[in-house]
Every structure is written in C-alpha cells, then in structure tokens.
Amino acid sequence: MTTNPLPGNSQLVMGHAENEVIVRIVGRGTMHESACVRAFIEDCLDNDASVLLDLNACNYLDSTFLGCLIALHRLGKRHENIAFRVCADHATCQRLLSTSTLTRLLNIVPQCPSMSTDEVCVAAEVPEPDALGRHVMQCHRLLADLGGEHAEQFRAIANRLELELEHSRRT
C-alpha cells in the first residue's frame, strides 16, 4: 500500500471522545475512502476500541462505501464489549442512506459527541488495484445479500468483478 491524499477534496479525520474513536468523513465517501476507512476501523475494533463513524460532514456515499458499512457493522457485532456506530442526523440519513435498507441495519445516532482530543487527518493508504478490486467486489456482494430493489444489480457487479479479478490473476 502507498500513502496518498484521497482523491478529490475528501478527508478522513480522527479523534477520541470518552471511550470511543471517532472517524469523520468530510466530503465524499467512495470506493477509495471506503478501503481506507475499513482498514482503519477494523484495526480499531480488533484492538478493542469502540468506533463512531461520523457522516454528518459527508455529502455522498457510493455503493462500495455502503457495502463497506455492512462489513463494519458485522465486524462490530462480533465483539462483545465494543461497538461500531454511525453518526448521521435525520437529513444526513435521508441524503446518504435512504436509497438502501441500511437505516434498519446500522446502529445510527443523530449527534456526535465532541472530540476530547485534537482532530487528526488520517493519511489514506491506497490499496493496490487487485486489493481494491476485491474490496469493491466484497462490498457489492454484501449489498446484494442485504436484498432490496437493487440487489441483482449489485450481484451482477460483484460477479463481473470476480471474473475480471480471476482473469487478471491468470495473465
């Protein structure tokens, strides 16, 4: 992995509040940000730190990022004494999550506590193309498995990516 600024004007900001790590997405949440967010939050959860993902400064989430939220939710559920929560007020939920069934799945809180430490921008670790392709494929499989009106489209995207990844490994 290489460390680069995120594409566009997106930023990942990290801080702490009471007993949890807060990760704030400022700008867009796309496949590029989702790979970095997933790795960072998985590391926090694996080290027994509760995480609150703040989406209130986010203006867009693509389908890969939505699938990533499912993966993080499931990972958080595997831990007994820690939590993965999403902070999104009503307007943010409507703007970012209303086209999916994620509002019924995720543990969403409307307000984010103030950070008790200084905010720090998290450097993005951009995965290699193959790793990014697997991440995108997995996220779309999770969306397909969740069901909903676009499930078959997400499954088709995941299947196509799987074929392309298999082809690239053979060549």
Image: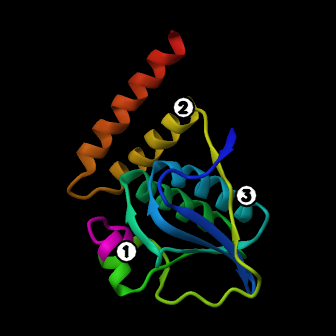
Specify whether residue 97 is painted magenta.
yes
**Type of amino acid under label 2:** Pro
Q: Is residue 128 above or below residue 64?
A: above
Q: Is residue 153 above or below residue 170?
A: below
Mark 1–mark 3 distance (CA, rounded to whole Å) = 24 Å
Dot 1 crowding, Cα within 10 Å, few <14, some 14–19, many 20+: some
Q: Report the label total.
A: 3
Dot 2 crowding, Cα within 10 Å, few <14, some 14–19, many 20+: few
Q: Earlier in the sequence, mark 1 or mark 2?
A: 1
Q: Residue at x 73, y 80 (%)?
A: 16
Q: Residue at x 24, y 44 (%)?
A: 152
Q: How is the image coloured?
A: rainbow
**Observer-nearest of 33 and 153:** 33
**Residue 77 at what x, y percent from top left?**
59, 67
Horizontal arrangement in the rendering, residue 54 relative to residue 104 (left or right)? right
**Residue 136 at what x, y percent from top left?**
46, 42
Q: Secondary structure at mark 1?
A: helix
**Observer-nearest of 36 and 69:** 36
Q: Residue furthest top?
A: 171
**Type of amino acid under label 3:** Asp
Q: Residue furthest left?
A: 149
Q: Secondary structure at mark 3?
A: helix
Mark 1–mark 2 distance (CA, rounded to whole Å) = 31 Å
* Labelled disc at residue 103: 1
Mark 3–mark 2 distance (CA, rounded to whole Å) = 21 Å
Q: Which residue is mark 3?
A: 43
Magenta residue span? 95-102
Q: Which residue is mark 2?
A: 129
